Image: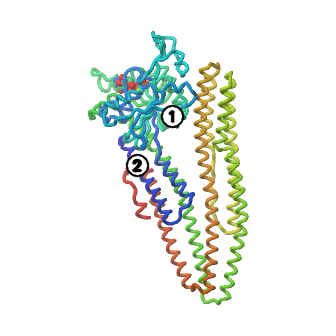
Amino acid sequence: MSLAQQFSAYSQWRLAIIAATVRFRQWLIEQDLSDAQAELRLSRLEARIREDKLNVAFVAEFSRGKSELINSIFFAAYGSRVLPSSAGRTTMCPTELLYVADKPPVIELLSIQTRGGNTSVSEYKQSPDAWQRIPLDVHSAKAMQDALRQVSEVIRVSPEEAASLGFTVDETQVGAFHVDEAGQVEIPRWRHAVINFPHPLLEQGLVILDTPGLNAIGTEPELTLSLLPNAHAVLFILAADTGVTQSDLLVWREHIARNHGKRGRLVVLNKIDGLWDDLKSEAEIDAEIVRQTKTCADILGIPSAQIFPVSAQKGLVAKINQDAGLLGKSRLPELEAALSDELIPAKHDIVRDDTQCEFGEIHHHIRELLEVRHSNLNDQIAELSDLRGKNRNVVEYMMGKIRVEKEEFDAGLQHYYAVRSVFSTLTNKLFAHLGVRPLRQLTEKTRQTMLDANFSRQISRAIHGFFQEVKTNLKKSGDEVREIRVMMDSVYKRLQVEHGLKLANPVDFSLVIYEREIHRLETWCDTHLNTAVQFMTHEKKNIAQKFFEEIAVQSQKIFGRANWDVESWLKIIMGPVETRVREHQLHLKRRLDSIERIHEAADTLEERIQELVSMKGDLQQQITSLDAIARAMQALMRRGEKRGADDSRPDDTVAQRA
Ligand SMILES: Nc1nc2c(ncn2[C@@H]2O[C@H](COP(=O)(O)OP(=O)(O)OP(=O)(O)O)[C@@H](O)[C@H]2O)c(=O)[nH]1
Ligand SMILES: [Mg+2]
């Protein structure tokens, strides 16, 4: 199956899960079983799956054929080159190709002058006004090419301005950013481009990142700290005509080998058509490709099998002309297969784990509630059945007994209210460390220290201090999480011992993944920033500040996610207690009501028992439906597990069975 087919099958599977989630939510509402917690968790799950993105980045030195490879893998159906690809430097700024449905097809461009300030691209993404917009006419290949040519635009500025924008101006005539005869330096016109493009794969959540070669990667914090490390797959491209040059090796070591383990990393040896030779036999050509692949593998320090030799250009031509022979020779299908093998199963796992966790817990919670109701009804039926043939005195005695039980339970609730107040004190303490506001204050303080700094040591110290405090806050939050957990443990136990309300143990929560992400940012700073600012100049201070801004944005994101998770966890551990207490209160009230009505002879005993039996029937029906929903969801999960997602029918069994 081609990448496009696999991806689309995966998307269908994802849609089926969303549909099942929506139906489950509706069912809960119809059955009057929904509560704020279930509603919140299911709607968040649905939003997460819906917005789920798959990021693929193409990284290499200039002219290795990144853009051509993107054209041949994703855009051949347009019958021509969509992204500009030509000899020399072509893609001048990092370019993201994606699709957001509520925007028209458009290219959004951020001017290179914005690099003069400290605001990072991530931050600019929050302010749409900063971007220039060029509408995209997707029905005309020619118009589209013209518009997309923007990513190759350059401007000429003075050497001083180029330096102030972070370009290393070369004294010689050969460097990438050199001074020409007129004393000017040619630099990219744009800092970043985002192309909103209704391509079928992009519509399904694929995001493609094309990067410019050269040192652009090293100077854009968003690329280094966010876009590349967060990509689900990174393709590193070499070219057969150049082999592995020093600068290829630098890009590989700095940005790929370090950040990306084997998973999600693909190395491509492009332009193998350069080795095709009519005077050589096929076997000789193949042997030459094997030899070149091995050389590259040795230099990069990876096995030959991890390198995919292809011809992006011939692959594109073959697809456009529907020439199967040439396509085979281009070896593009092998690369596509490897890419989808990297991407799709990893994606499946993430979506499946997330769904299983959220759906599983809500299902468990509701199932438990229904079982409690069921057993309460049984008790009540037994209680009333025992009264058959008994006289008024016995009824009175029973009434008194239930009243006492109810009073005792209500009195016991005082303890529960006290616990609630401790719980909110502890959570307030937790958010004082984990909240985004304290982080914002810390960021501001660090920013100010950096601005005032005159020596590189001060900058290093400011950044070090920032990370120390962030880590301390995370650690303290972890301690508070544990404290809350211990307290809830005792609440759960007490409810069981004193009132016989059985609850499964409160779930655990850990902040380890967030600690790890902060650690990644810190390690990066330790290895890059500290050496970069060793001898401080104005430009270096500027670079350090820009990187710090990106670190601040990334840290905010990490803390934002941690907050979100903690909030859900707090609801998850407190929710069942609230439900059970409420349910038990209702149960006692119902028991008392029925017996009072029987006592006043407003209802006969038999009528009341009949009513309870019919309620039990309804409840059993609900349990059966819920089990069917769970089975259907399990089947849907298994479908994603076993066959990849090759079954593309949306699942409708959930609704039918429910
Ligand atoms: N012979 C041959 N040429 C190729 C192949 N792929 C790309 N090229 C050529 O290599 C040149 C550079 O290709 P691009 O796609 O612009 O390379 P890039 O990596 O995007 O380069 P920058 O955008 O400058 O960073 C163009 O002239 C392409 O036509 C290939 O498979 N075979
Ligand atoms: Mg390019």
Q: Position of residue 317 (x, y in %)?
A: 30, 30
**Does any portion of residue 634 appear in the rendered image?**
no
Q: Position of residue 528 (x, y in %)?
A: 60, 26
532, above or below 622, in the image: above
Give me the residue at 53% from left, 64% from top: 33
Residue identified by numbered label 1: 227
Q: Nearer the viewer, residue 509 or 155?
A: 155
Quarter of image, ligand 2: top left
Q: Position of residue 484 (x, y in %)?
A: 69, 53
Give me the residue at 47% from left, 63% from top: 27
Q: Which mark is residue 645?
A: 2
| Label 2 environment density (alpha carbons within 10 Å; few <14, some 14–19, many ≥20) | many
What amino acid is found at the position of numbered circle 2 in the picture?
Ala
What amino acid is found at the position of numbered circle 1 in the picture?
Leu
Q: Would residue 434 appear left or right of 309 to someone viewing this image?
A: right
Q: Position of residue 230 (x, y in %)?
A: 52, 37
Circle 2: element type: loop
Mark pair 2, 1: CA separation: 27 Å
Cβ–Cβ under 8 Å for marks 2 and 1: no
Q: Is mark 1 within 8 Å of ligand 1?
A: no
Q: Point out the image quarter for the N terminus.
A: top left
Q: Would residue 275 appear left or right of 637 to someone viewing this image?
A: left
368, above or below 242, in the image: below
Circle 1: element type: helix
Marker count (numbered): 2
Give the quadrant of residue 140: top left
Between disc 2 and disc 1, the foreground one is: 1
Q: Nearer the viewer, residue 629 or 82?
A: 82
**Does any portion of residue 369 appear in the rendered image?**
yes
Q: Nearer the viewer, residue 596 or 64?
A: 596
